[in-house]
Amino acid sequence: MPILTHALVKHLSQLQLKSYRNFEKEFIIEGAKLIEECLSSGWEVTRIITSDPNQASFSMPDILTYVCDEAAIKKISTHSTPPSVLASVKIRPTELKQLMSGQQFILCIDGVADPGNLGTIIRTADWFGVKSILLSENSVDLYNEKVVRSTMGSLFHPRIYQSKDIVSDIESLKKSGYKIITTSVNEGKAELPNDNFCLMLGSESHGVRHKLEDRADSSYHIPGYGQAESLNLAVSTGIILYDLKEIKKLI
């Protein structure tokens, strides 16, 4: 088996940094279950690193597998108690036009800063069969280790595009015939369109930004019956996606 050099350990540990991930087009996943899901979903695993020789069963002819000590694993991992196996994976490039390809429904998330929340949203969207997710440029990085971990493997299923300019992308969707539906805390439920549409949800603290609200065709509201001020964004996503699945059968 190949030797895990100091230079390679340094490279892999630097993938914890967003700027380095973007430059190298690579990110880290941790744990056997996540690696299995990644491989079965057809993503490109570039290396497998393990402190357990039994985990070498992941090895494929075109994937380098390194057996190392726990100290090396700890340098690469973001866990306080790291798993015995992790892998580096190539970032899969996605463009806006791929989100639109054959899809009547696109889920757009604006300004979500909490990585656990974003990961849960992606996992929830995957549960309901959402195939296309648009993520604003001011949201947490899609390949942040906490996002990846909290998706529980759902990262590898839908097409997810992290925008460089969400306003421009929303305009492109409108020009392509998509209706833009935003969420609102104080308006009645909108009549959902029967044709292509994009549903936008915003951060819990600020909601969908005004410059995006201004481009919406209508709004959608979850009625509340108690005294809570707001709903968790991931919970809101689940409620709305269930509603769409049951009423419109669009997803």
Image (cartoon, rainbow, N blue to C red):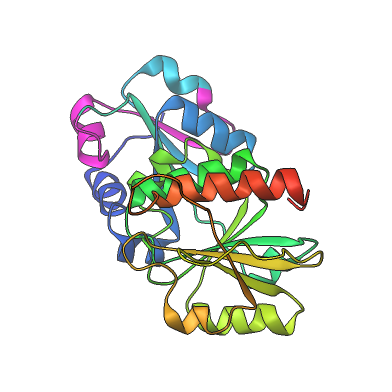
Residue 219: in magenta span: no
Residue 146 locus on image (x, y percent):
33, 45
Residue 191 in sight: yes
Position of the N terminus, as image quadrant, is top left
Q: Place residue 76 in its image quadrant.
A: top left
Which of the pair 205/129 is nearer the observer? 205
Highlighted range, magenta: 58-80
Q: Place residue 204 in its image quadrant.
A: bottom left
Which of the pair 34/202 is nearer the observer? 202
Please name the residue shown 49% across and 50% down the image: 236
Q: Is residue 33 left or right of residue 7?
A: right
Please name the residue shown 65% across and 47% down the image: 243
Q: Is residue 166 above or below residue 54?
A: below
Residue 70: in magenta span: yes
Please name the residue shown 72% across and 85% down the image: 175
Residue 108 locus on image (x, y percent):
55, 64
Q: Is residue 166 above or below residue 26?
A: below
Q: Is residue 31 above or below residue 145?
A: above
Q: Is residue 85 left or right of residue 192?
A: left
